[in-house]
Amino acid sequence: MVLTERGPLLIEGPVEVEGPDGVTHVSDRFVVAVCTCRRSRTLPWCDTSHRRRAAPHRAAPPDRPSGPGE
């Protein structure tokens, strides 16, 4: 199992995933991407919807205080 940064959970298949409604989803692929962002239209499988999500805003690093000679 591999949890990708800002992406799906990759699992060696075949797999069965039970959803919160009790329905079992089956995939016989050799690697299965399970959605972790909950934006996929094909839950529980990843449809790359996480790629369309805006990247989190990173604050600029604070300015360094000036020292002598700078």
Image: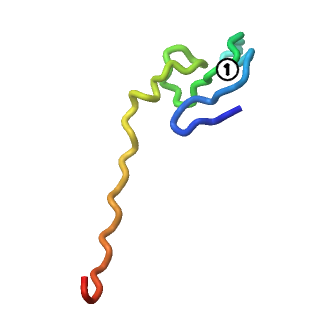
Quarter placement of the C terminus = bottom left
Quarter placement of the N terminus = top right
Query: Which residue is rendered at x = 46% and y = 29% of the image?
Result: 50
Question: Quadrant of residue 12 in the image?
Answer: top right
Residue 25 in the image: state x and y as whole percent: 68, 12
Q: What's the coloring here?
A: rainbow
Q: Nearer the viewer, residue 31 or 55?
A: 31
Residue 4 in the image: state x and y as whole percent: 58, 36
Query: Is 70 placed above or below 32 here?
Result: below
- Residue that mark 1 sits on: 31
Query: Is 41 placed above or below 53 here?
Result: above
Query: Which residue is rendered at x = 37% and y = 36% of the image?
Result: 54
Query: Which residue is rendered at x = 32% and y = 74% of the image?
Result: 64
| For residue 13, side relative to residue 37 (left or right) | right
Q: Residue furthest bottom?
A: 68
Q: Nearer the viewer, residue 28 or 59?
A: 28
Residue 18 in the image: state x and y as whole percent: 71, 18
| For residue 45, side relative to residue 58 (left or right) | right
Name the kind of residue labelled 1 in the image.
Val
Describe the element under mark 1 as helix, strand or loop.
strand
Query: Is 23 placed above or below 59 here?
Result: above
Report whether residue 26 is seen: no
Question: Quadrant of residue 30 in the image?
Answer: top right
Q: Residue furthest front?
A: 69
Report whether residue 16 is seen: yes
Near mark 1 (Cα within 10 A), the count class, few <14, some 14-19 or many ≥20, is some
Query: Which residue is rendered at x = 57% and y = 17% of the image?
Result: 43
